[in-house]
Image: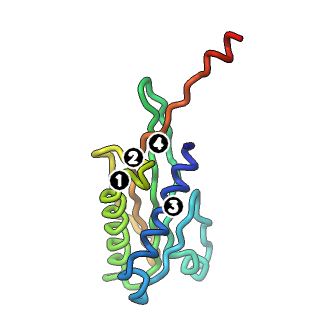
């Protein structure tokens, strides 16, 4: 399991949970695009509107400690809504949905273990209206690479 493979596995899980959620898929709500990596930057309002709503998942950091390897997974959520008062509520809703699904299904697919107490959700005060964004970060244990000493001494 590589850091990229972990991010891709979490993307697949999120897609699956979004499809299974009647409230999000059958209510006429916006359909979320889910990506691994980075989202293209929209230059015009129409480009930004076409990109949203989106969920982007990537590994932001990997630490190889003495006893474990830990990847920090960042989930970035963006939406487009011109309503200055209520526009942020869709973002709040999807962030809570993701947080709930990740924590109640941990370890994700019995493979990606979110370290207890590591999840942080963030909604910056500065929002690029009419685009809204937030993020969720958490730590996942990865198998630690070990040197194969049998090959060294042959």
Residue 68 point in image, percent of width and height: 43, 31
Residue 69 point in image, percent of width and height: 46, 34
Residue at 30 percent across and 59 percent down: it is: 104
Report, in whole angstroms, how far the alpha carbon at label 2 lies from the one at label 4: 10 Å
State the residue position of label 3. Answer: 11
State the residue position of label 4. Answer: 71
The N terminus: image quadrant = top right
Return the residue nearer the eye: 13 or 62.
13
Report, in whole angstroms, how far the alpha carbon at label 3 lies from the one at label 1: 14 Å
Residue 72 point in image, percent of width and height: 45, 45
Marks 4 and 1: in contact by CB < 8 Å?
no
Marks 1 and 2: in contact by CB < 8 Å?
yes
Q: Is residue 108 above or below residue 68?
A: below
Look at the numbered disc 4 and give the secondary structure of its residue.
strand
State the residue position of label 2. Answer: 113
Residue at 44 percent across and 73 percent down: it is: 18
State the residue position of label 1. Answer: 106
Report the mark closest to the observer, 3 or 4. 3
Marks 3 and 2: in contact by CB < 8 Å?
no
**Marks 3 and 1, the one that precedes in the sequence:** 3
Spot the residue most to the left. 117
Return the residue nearer the eye: 107 or 59.
107
**Marks 2 and 3, the one that precedes in the sequence:** 3
Report the mark closest to the observer, 1 or 4. 1
**Marks 1 and 4, the one that precedes in the sequence:** 4
Look at the numbered disc 2 and give the secondary structure of its residue.
loop
């Amino acid at each position: 399991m590589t850091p990229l493979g972990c991010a891709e596995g979490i993307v697949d899980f999120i897609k699956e949970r979004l499809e299974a959620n009647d409230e999000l898929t059958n209510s006429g709500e916006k359909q979320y695009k889910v990506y691994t990596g980075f989202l293209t930057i929209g230059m015009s309002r129409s480009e930004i509107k076409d990109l949203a709503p989106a969920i982007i998942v990537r590994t932001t950091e990997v630490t190889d400690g003495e006893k474990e390897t830990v990847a920090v997974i960042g989930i970035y959520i963006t939406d487009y809504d011109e309503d200055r008062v209520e526009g942020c509520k869709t973002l709040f809703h999807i962030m809570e949905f993701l947080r709930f699904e990740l924590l109640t299904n941990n370890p994700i697919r019995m493979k990606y273990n979110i370290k207890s107490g590591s999840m942080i959700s963030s909604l910056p005060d500065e929002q690029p209206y009419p685009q809204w964004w937030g993020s969720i970060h958490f730590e996942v244990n990865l198998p630690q690479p070990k040197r194969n000493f049998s090959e060294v001494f042959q």
